[in-house]
Image: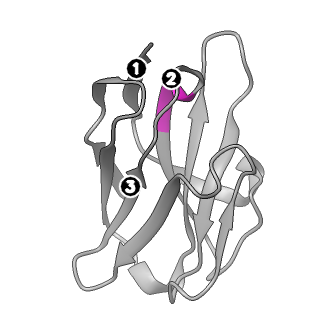
Amino acid sequence: VQLQASGGGLVQAGGSLRLSCVASGLTFDDHSMAWFRQAPGKEREAVTVISGSGGTRYYADSVKGRFTISRDNAKLTVYLQMDSLKPEDTAVYYCAASRRPWAPPNPYEFAYWGQGTQLTVSS
């Protein structure tokens, strides 16, 4: 299984950015997908999770109303649309896949990880 994340960069506060993660080596819609992030000196935290079918989503309180997760099972891709970005969103963002169609937002539930992409939000 490979997960290839892309789309990070430098953006001003209030701006938008979209991350993408392309998967290979798995039956994509059998797996829930998630975005986690890790800021310097902090633990990795779950940002959002989407079920294999796309019908169920979880969002951390800190991103509700600003971030949107979606997936295109035909393209084996999960997206993270990030709007109204804040400096505190600055982190390395990781996409991850669980072994099940739904998994709770816990890093231990996710078996496969991408390489991470850096998001920096300037004030």
Q: Identify the magenta region.
A: 89-93
**Pointer 1 or 2: first along the chain:** 2
Count neighbours of disc 1 (C-alpha within 10 A) and say few if under 14, some if 14 to 19, many if 20 or more. some
**Tags 3 and 2 in contact by the CB under 8 Å rule?**
no
Residue that badge 3 annotates? 81
Q: Position of residue 69 (x, y in %)?
A: 47, 64
Side of 99 where 123 appears, left or right:
left
Residue that badge 1 annotates? 120
Q: Callout 2, which amino acid?
A: Thr
Which quadrant would residue 5 be assigned to in this image? top left
The secondary structure that dominates the magenta segment is: strand
Count neighbours of disc 3 (C-alpha within 10 A) and say few if under 14, some if 14 to 19, many if 20 or more. some
**Pointer 3 or 1: first along the chain:** 3
| Label 3 to label 1: alpha-carbon separation | 15 Å
Count neighbours of disc 2 (C-alpha within 10 A) and say few if under 14, some if 14 to 19, many if 20 or more. many
Of 101 and 18, nearer the camera is 18
